[in-house]
Image (cartoon, grey):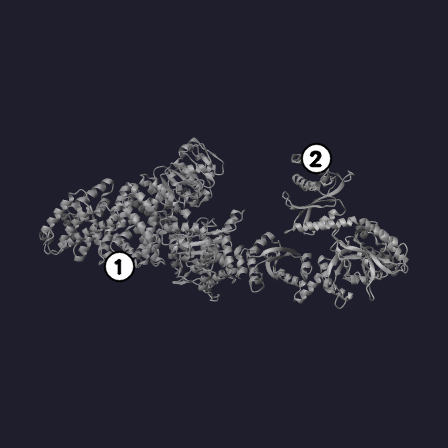
């Protein structure tokens, strides 16, 4: 079965299935008729469903009642079309000729495109009411039925189609068609009568002419003419010389019927007056054109055949006029075979008298054969002869010939133009027509071009005119004008080029035909000049051409090589606000040169006129060039070029501010912000002017009033727009400096913009708010640098968070502030992102782009950073500074930039920056963190401490570990080589999962070492022979992983098979000794946090809550492995850990040391005492010392956290109070740092849980920040004695060989501040520097001075070192108890100094004054102790020796515990010039006699639940020591050899009273504050000048 049959079967089935009215038989018959004989391709253009629907609609229309002669017309939308068309015209009409043509013409006149058409003719029988009387049949099949034409036309309707008007137009056309068809036979009969009338030539009429006319009419009747109308005319006398013709009533037929409106009965050929001129003409026959096109059959100008009517005497009495269309055969047949025309041809040939068979005769015959048929019909014999002989006489070299004929009725000029074929183009034809229209003052009606033999083209057109041409027509003059107007385009180009003073012959023939048809030579010369300056590698150039007649913007784009696609160009232009509606491409091909091209665009813009004046058009071209070249971004801000008149550089500034705002968590999308700015273009222009006014170093910027700007902001109606614009204004006013006005080496604006901000002046910035902020913008990169202070440092990371990299950097800066508490600079952090990263990019290409972006970022920072030249600070060139000197800028490596330090230092040297290669630490001439393993080793100090507190020495005994990372990594690799006792059970990175259920420590250590030393080794490179049974290395890309029983036992897993991510979760929660994080990512959160809160989507599927961890200890060698809330949750569950800022601060510390060392040695180099090679050798030599200094910091900081953690319950109030103080002072934000709020504090109190280690770690860092700020703001760092502390912060070799470089360091004050701050906080904890001076009304820096004095007087550091030497020899609880004894002694001495403001002086003086005696007294203290003092000392000594201390250290500890009054004794001795030993003996004897030792111990044991209770206790203790000293002073001042006995006697009664009171109190189990206050008051009675009443009365 063929496809048509299959289709018909399908339609039959559908008809039956959908038959609801019992019409299936009739409908099936109709379907067969409808699609019978239709080509398969036509049917295939519609789906079966669509064909069925179409047939159904047509049948339903056919089935409607219809009487003979009625039209059924419907225009319906298509609901199931295929997208090419959307409307259907359906008709049912009595069958008649020309229906399809006529309906198609009506549809096309609306502008619609016809897509599909069927037009079956069916025979239908209808009853008297017009209803179907049976099924339809094929046409002619039933003699008792009529043929009806069923036509369906499907078309794509033009926009705004007036369906009613279309239906009316169709009805009118069908009415006319019915008239024509009905009158066809009468019109033919009329023609026969006319021919019969000519059988006898009237008197005076040429018989031959009559005979030829008869022959012509017979030829016409032989289907060479389609009759559309007829009208009979008769001559009537009107008076005067002329007659006129009028219609003969009831003679009209077809379209010329009297009852048909719309046709001028007199003017359808020509105006009556013109026609009447020829009313008495002797010509029997006239063939001419009507004034209208046919709307039936073919859309062509209708033809008119007029035959004169004569009376018997030969007078003209009227005329017959037939209206219609000559058939196609009439135009195709040879004129020699057409009556009337053959006569004209014979006449021309005879008159030409050419030799038969000659070339000229043949040429003339060819000219006549091919001559326009209408011209043959309408030209007189003379006109025809003159024209064709002129054509025959044309020379082959002639450029153009014109033959002009005026229509006999003066309606039009017939113009025939001959020109060489090689010159012919459509553009040339149109130019000829335009010139003829201009000269003849008319409009072209018909234009036709025909290619003739002999390489000639003939253009024939009719120019319709309303009247005669002014001044008449000179054909030869018109021809000359046409020659000039049609001069060859290349010739005109050459002439125009000469006129423009240039010669560009290669371009004369280069432009394609489309271009030459559209543009004149002058425009081409301008375009060629522009193209001549481009090569194939040059970016395209855009030029504003002007405004079109419609007010649209006209643009041209010029380029060489590959063309810019429309999809690339349109978005760019649209972002300028240009709505492109027209594009025309042109090719420019010069012989021997690369191809070039021009694209022409027409676009709408609401402010198009702005481009026609001023610089905006040039700005658009410049901005376009920047975008194409990658120097500028393509976004909606480019609208400001036209809307605000901003130059491209100014738009870059707007883009810089906008990009910064988008990073500040402004809650709008980039597109929305761009829309708001573009909508307020004038205000944005004012904001740009304000910026330029503030920072133009030349002072030439336009002045703008900020008051006006504020008023304009107030006038903004939209809340969103107001927020955006005020934020923009805030950034402008917060900017402190910018490189915006700097130039590159070529004098051009730099391709990037950097701004330095005071963030506190930027509205709505998220907290914490840094002190300074720099933002760098470039089309390919953006970066931000946040600093916590003027001297700050931190890494620059290559971020992949394009949308919120500032948020990422801000979080890291916050952590860096905490981490940097141990070094000179405060925290800083920077980050940059690359934009428009290609989807497919090699690692090498990406690295190259990263380096390029990093360089731009660094340059942007250096551009706005001051420099040091000698001792002077030099501002950067062309930078207006609205802030103080700011020469300190140091960067470091971070994620993605680990190998970039040399690049940064190279830029530093390029800029002549004073820090040279100290600008970025870790370069080729610096300390390599991985080689030193410094980050991992620093974190390992914390890990070892955790295990010591658990009673384990992980350097000596095996322990189990799971880890994050691989051996190729710095932190993981180095970390897993820090103990040979490691049993690494499992680890994972981004590619593999490693499991070793029962590892051998020695063998696996060696294998890990091998992998670490092998470049780029992965877990898959691990020797499988060394993996214990049940282990292996698995791909993370695997679907599932089968687990052995050994692996499940080692990791405490029940499941036998897990997905890789599920397995990683089990590894993280494994019950091991240590979880070591040496990788990238956040793997632990708190249960109160969502994964979205974490901000690390890559690890959402493997992340755990802190309470799920079962490892005893977590070591954070890597950053951000746990959220702070996750750490706290883990710690509250009993886990041991610090924070990443504490654990991995070794990298920060070593980098800062490198910078400080290089700064010191830079001065030595500058003085010529050291060259660079020697400097680098010295740096390498000092590596061990650098490591030792860094690890010492890690050791001390974690030790202090442990000391505070040990007292976290007993000193909870003190720690919380200090936290609240920091918050009150604006230093700390509890919420940001995840520190407990008041509700959580209350819960901790109830549950007897203090602050956790992660929380204490944060407070330690903030304490150092607060203390450092207080110290550097005071004069303590300027005390000369503190220069010696500088040596403690540098390797010994540097201090010994170049001491002046250390003491003269540019950061001397900051270094001293950092060193003394670290020392004090690491020794005394977080609250001492705040709480202690508060009790004496002193500043925090006074407490630091007091600590330094106390330490120097008593040599506290030496004692601390001896205690620390007991690691792994003494339980940590006892070690920490020893520390607390020393801390207590130092705090007491500090209090003593703070309470004696009269003892003042510089550090050296005070240390010399009291130091020697204090140390001597403390060393010999047991010799001077009496009674209870000595007993207490002895008990301590014995306890500590029993604990394992050697006797020397035990004695020193016992003396420290009993040495609270040492400085009281020393000051008494110094003040009286007495021997300190003598004074000590009396001091302790008096104290023993009065029970002072018991009293002070009792005060020490008082509870202090709250700040005020603690202050009261401290005051009471201080009073007891002060009174004790005063009493001892009394004794010393007693004259005579036995001062103590004399004093006893003098105060016997009071002494007895005090002794009795003490005895009474000692009998109380736990004397309270009130009891002890009374005791201290009673003790004070002994300080009066005379005895006092024991009862209150003398």
x and y percent of residue 563 in the render? 62, 54
**Quadrant where the N terminus is found in the figure:** top right
Residue placed most toward the observer, 693 or 589: 693
Q: Position of residue 994 (x, y in %)?
A: 44, 37
Task: Answer with left or right where residue 849 lies relative to residue 1316.
Answer: right
Q: Quadrant of the C terminus?
A: bottom left
Would you name the residue on which mark 1 appears? 1402
Q: Is residue 1224 left or right of residue 684?
A: left
Instruction: Tell me what residue is drawn at x 84 percent, y 62 percent.
Output: 280
Q: Position of residue 62 (x, y in %)?
A: 70, 41
Residue 179, image x and y in percent?
Answer: 77, 50
Looking at the image, tell me whether mark 2 or mark 1 is earlier in sequence order: 2
Residue at image x 74%, y 49%? 175
Check disc 2 and report its element: helix, strand or loop. helix
Please rate how many residues cluster around mark 1, counting C-alpha atoms within 10 Å: few if below 14, some from 14 to 19, many from 20: few
Q: Is residue 1212 visible in this depiction of the protein?
A: yes
User: Depth check: 1002 or 1587 in front?
Assistant: 1587
Q: Between 1314 and 542, which is closer to the camera in this rendering? A: 542
Q: Choose mark 2 or mark 1, whichever is in front.
A: 2
Does residue 1281 appear to the left or right of 168 in the view shown?
left
Q: Using the numbered discs, state the Cα–Cα distance from disc 2 to disc 1 in whole angstroms.
A: 123 Å
Mark sitting on residue 1463: none
Q: Residue furthest top?
A: 1045
Q: Nearer the viewer, residue 1348 or 1519?
A: 1519
Task: Specify the farthest residue to the bottom.
Answer: 471
Is residue 25 shown left or right of residue 1487?
right
Residue that label 2 marks? 25
Q: Are marks 2 and 1 in contact (CB under 8 Å)?
A: no
The answer to whether residue 406 is seen in the rendering is no
The answer to which image quadrant residue 408 occupies is bottom right
């Amino acid at each position: 079965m063929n496809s048509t049959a299959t289709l018909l079967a399908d339609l039959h089935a559908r008809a039956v299935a959908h038959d609801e009215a019992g019409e299936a038989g009739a409908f099936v018959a109709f379907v067969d008729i409808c699609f019978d004989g239709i080509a398969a391709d036509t049917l295939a253009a519609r789906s079966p469903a669509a064909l069925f629907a179409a047939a159904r609609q047509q049948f339903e229309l056919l089935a409607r009642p219809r009487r003979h002669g009625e039209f059924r017309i419907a225009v319906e939308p298509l609901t199931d079309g295929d997208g090419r068309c959307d409307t259907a015209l359906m008709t049912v009409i009595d069958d008649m000729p020309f229906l399809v043509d006529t309906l198609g013409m009506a549809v096309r006149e609306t502008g619609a495109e016809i897509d599909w058409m069927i037009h079956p003719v069916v025979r239908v029988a209808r009853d008297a009411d017009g209803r179907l009387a049976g099924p339809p049949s094929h046409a002619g099949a039933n003699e008792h039925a009529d043929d009806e034409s069923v036509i369906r036309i499907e078309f794509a309707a033009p926009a705004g189609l007036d369906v009613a008007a279309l239906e009316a137009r169709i009805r009118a056309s069908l009415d006319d068609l019915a008239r024509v068809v009905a009158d066809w036979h009468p019109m033919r009969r009329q023609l026969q009568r006319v021919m019969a009338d000519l059988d006898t030539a009237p008197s005076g009429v040429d018989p031959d002419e009559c005979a030829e006319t008869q022959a012509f009419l017979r030829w016409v009747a032989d289907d060479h003419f389609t009759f559309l109308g007829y009208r009979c005319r008769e001559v009537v006398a009107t008076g005067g010389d002329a007659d006129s013709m009028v219609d003969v009533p009831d003679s009209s037929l077809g379209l010329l019927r009297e009852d048909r409106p719309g046709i001028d009965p007199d003017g359808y050929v020509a105006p009556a007056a013109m026609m009447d001129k020829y009313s008495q003409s002797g010509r029997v026959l006239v063939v001419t054109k009507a004034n209208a096109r046919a709307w039936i059959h073919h859309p062509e100008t209708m033809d008119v055949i007029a035959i004169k009517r004569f009376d018997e005497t030969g007078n003209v009495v009227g005329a017959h006029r037939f209206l219609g269309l000559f058939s196609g055969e009439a135009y195709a047949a040879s004129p020699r075979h057409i009556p009337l025309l053959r006569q004209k041809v014979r006449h021309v040939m005879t008159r030409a008298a050419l030799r038969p068979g000659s070339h000229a005769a043949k040429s003339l015959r060819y000219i006549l054969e091919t001559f326009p048929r209408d011209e043959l019909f309408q030209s007189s014999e003379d006109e025809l002869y003159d024209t064709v002989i002129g054509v025959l006489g044309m020379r082959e070299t002639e450029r153009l010939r014109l033959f002009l004929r005026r229509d006999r009725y003066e309606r039009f000029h017939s113009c025939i133009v001959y020109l060489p074929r090689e010159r012919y183009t459509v553009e040339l034809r149109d130019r000829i027509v335009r010139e003829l229209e201009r000269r003849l003052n008319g409009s072209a009606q018909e234009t036709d071009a025909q290619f003739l033999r002999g390489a000639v083209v003939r253009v024939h057109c009719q120019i319709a005119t309303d009247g005669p041409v002014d001044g008449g027509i000179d054909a030869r003059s018109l021809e000359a004008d046409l020659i000039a107007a049609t001069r060859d385009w290349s010739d005109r180009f050459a002439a125009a080029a000469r006129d423009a003073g240039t010669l560009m012959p290669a371009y004369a023939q280069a432009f394609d035909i489309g271009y030459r048809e559209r543009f004149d030579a002058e425009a081409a010369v301008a375009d060629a000049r522009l193209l001549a300056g481009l090569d194939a590698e040059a970016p395209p150039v855009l030029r504003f051409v002007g405004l079109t007649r419609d007010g649209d913007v006209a643009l041209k784009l010029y380029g060489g090589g590959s063309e810019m696609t429309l999809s690339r160009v349109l978005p760019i232009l649209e972002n300028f606000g240009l709505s492109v509606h027209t594009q025309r491409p042109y090719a420019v091909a010069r012989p021997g040169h690369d191809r070039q091209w021009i694209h022409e665009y027409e676009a709408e813009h609401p402010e198009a006129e702005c481009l026609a004046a001023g610089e905006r058009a040039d700005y658009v071209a410049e901005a376009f060039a920047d975008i194409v070249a990658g120097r500028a971004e393509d976004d909606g801000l480019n609208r400001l070029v036209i809307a605000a008149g901003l130059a491209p550089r100014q738009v870059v500034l707007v883009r810089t501010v906008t990009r910064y705002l988008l990073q500040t968590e402004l809650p709008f999308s980039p597109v929305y912000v761009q829309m708001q700015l573009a909508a307020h273009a004038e205000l944005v222009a004012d904001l740009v002017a304000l910026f330029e006014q503030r920072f133009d170093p030349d002072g030439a910027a336009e002045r703008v009033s900020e008051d006006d700007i504020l008023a304009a902001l107030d006038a903004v109606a939209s809340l969103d727009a107001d927020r955006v614009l005020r934020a923009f204004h805030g950034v402008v006013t917060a900017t402190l400096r910018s490189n915006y006005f700097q130039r590159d080496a070529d004098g051009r604006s730099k391709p990037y913009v950097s701004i330095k901000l005071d963030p506190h002046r930027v509205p709505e910035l998220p907290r914490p708010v840094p002190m300074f902020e720099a933002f760098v913008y470039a089309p390919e990169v953006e970066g931000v640098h946040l600093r916590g202070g003027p001297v700050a440092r931190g890494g620059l990371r290559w971020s992949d968070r394009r949308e919120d990299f500032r948020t990422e950097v801000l979080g890291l800066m916050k952590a860096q502030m905490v981490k940097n508490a141990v070094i000179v600079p405060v925290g800083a952090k920077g980050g940059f992102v690359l934009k428009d990263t290609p989807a497919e990019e090699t690692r090498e290409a990406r690295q190259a782009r990263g380096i390029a972006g990093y360089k731009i970022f660094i340059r942007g920072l250096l551009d706005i950073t001051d420099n040091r030249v000698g001792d002077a600070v030099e501002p950067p060139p062309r930078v207006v500074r609205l802030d103080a000197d700011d020469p300190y800028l140091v960067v470091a490596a971070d994620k993605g930039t680990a190998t970039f330090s040399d690049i940064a230092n190279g830029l530093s040297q390029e800029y002549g920056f004073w820090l040279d290669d100290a600008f970025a630490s870790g370069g080729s001439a610096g300390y390599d963190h991985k080689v030193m393993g410094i980050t991992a080793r620093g974190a390992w100090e914390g890990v070892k401490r955790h295990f010591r507190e658990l009673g384990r020495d992980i350097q000596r005994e095996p322990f189990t570990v799971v880890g994050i990372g691989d051996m190729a990594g710095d932190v993981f690799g180095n970390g897993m080589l820090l103990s040979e006792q490691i049993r690494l059970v499992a680890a994972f990175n981004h590619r593999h999962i490693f499991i070793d259920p029962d590892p051998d420590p020695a063998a696996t250590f060696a294998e890990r070492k091998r992998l670490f030393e092998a470049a780029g080794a992965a877990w898959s490179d691990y020797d499988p022979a060394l993996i214990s049974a049940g282990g292996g290395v698995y791909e993370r890309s695997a679907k599932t992983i089968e687990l052995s029983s050994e692996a499940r036992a080692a990791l405490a897993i029940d499941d036998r098979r897990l997905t890789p991510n599920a397995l990683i979760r089990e590894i993280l929660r494994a019950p091991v000794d240590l979880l070591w994080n040496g990788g990238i990512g956040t793997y632990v959160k708190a249960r109160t946090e969502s994964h979205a809160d974490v901000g690390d989507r890559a690890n959402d599927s493997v992340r755990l809550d802190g309470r799920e961890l079962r490892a005893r200890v977590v070591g954070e060698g890597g950053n951000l492995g746990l959220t702070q809330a996750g750490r706290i949750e883990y710690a509250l569950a009993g886990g041991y850990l610090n924070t990443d800022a504490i654990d991995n601060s070794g990298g920060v510390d070593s980098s800062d040391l490198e910078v400080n060392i290089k700064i010191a040695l830079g001065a030595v180099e500058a003085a010529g005492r050291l060259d660079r090679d020697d400097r680098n050798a010295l740096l390498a030599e000092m590596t061990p010392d650098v490591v030792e200094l860094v690890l010492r910091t890690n050791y001390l900081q974690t030790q202090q956290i442990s000391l505070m953690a040990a007292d976290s319950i007993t000193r909870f109030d003190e720690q919380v109070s200090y936290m609240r103080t920091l918050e009150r002072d604006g230093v700390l934000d509890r919420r940001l740092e995840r520190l407990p709020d008041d509700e959580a504090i209350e819960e901790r109190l109830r549950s007897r849980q203090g602050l956790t280690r992660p929380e204490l770690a944060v407070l330690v860092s903030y304490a150092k920040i607060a203390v450092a700020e207080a110290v550097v703001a005071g004069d303590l760092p300027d005390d000369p004695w503190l220069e010696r502390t500088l040596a403690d912060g540098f390797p010994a070799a540097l201090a010994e060989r170049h001491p002046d470089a250390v003491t003269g360091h540019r950061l001397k004050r900051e270094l001293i501040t950092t060193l003394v701050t670290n020392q004090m906080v690491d020794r005394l904890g977080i609250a001492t520097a705040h709480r202690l001076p508060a009790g004496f009304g002193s500043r925090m820096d006074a407490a630091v001075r007091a600590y330094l004095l106390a330490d120097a007087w008593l040599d506290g550091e030496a004692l601390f070192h001896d205690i620390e030497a007991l690691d792994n020899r003494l339980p940590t609880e006892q070690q920490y108890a020893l520390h607390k004894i020393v801390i207590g002694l130092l705090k007491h001495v500090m209090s003593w100094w703070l309470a004696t403001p009269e003892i003042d002086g510089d550090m050296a003086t005070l240390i010399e004054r009291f130091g020697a005696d204090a140390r001597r007294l403390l060393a010999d203290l047991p010799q001077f102790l009496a009674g209870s003092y000595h007993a207490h000392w002895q008990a301590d000594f014995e306890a500590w020796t029993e604990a394992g201390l050697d006797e020397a250290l035990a004695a020193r500890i016992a003396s420290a515990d009993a040495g609270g009054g040492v400085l009281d004794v020393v000051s008494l001795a110094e003040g009286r010039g007495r021997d300190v030993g003598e004074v000590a003996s009396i001091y302790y004897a008096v104290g023993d006699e009065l029970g002072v030792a018991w009293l002070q111990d009792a005060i020490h044991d008082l509870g202090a639940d709250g700040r005020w209770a603690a202050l009261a206790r401290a005051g009471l203790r201080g009073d007891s020591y002060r009174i004790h000293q005063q009493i001892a002073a009394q004794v010393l001042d007693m004259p005579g050899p036995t001062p103590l006995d004399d004093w006893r006697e003098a105060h016997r009664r009071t002494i007895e009273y005090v002794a009795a009171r003490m005895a009474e109190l000692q009998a109380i189990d736990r004397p309270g504050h009130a009891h002890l206050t009374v005791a201290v008051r009673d003790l004070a009675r002994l300080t009066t000048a005379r005895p006092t009443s024991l009862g209150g009365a003398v």
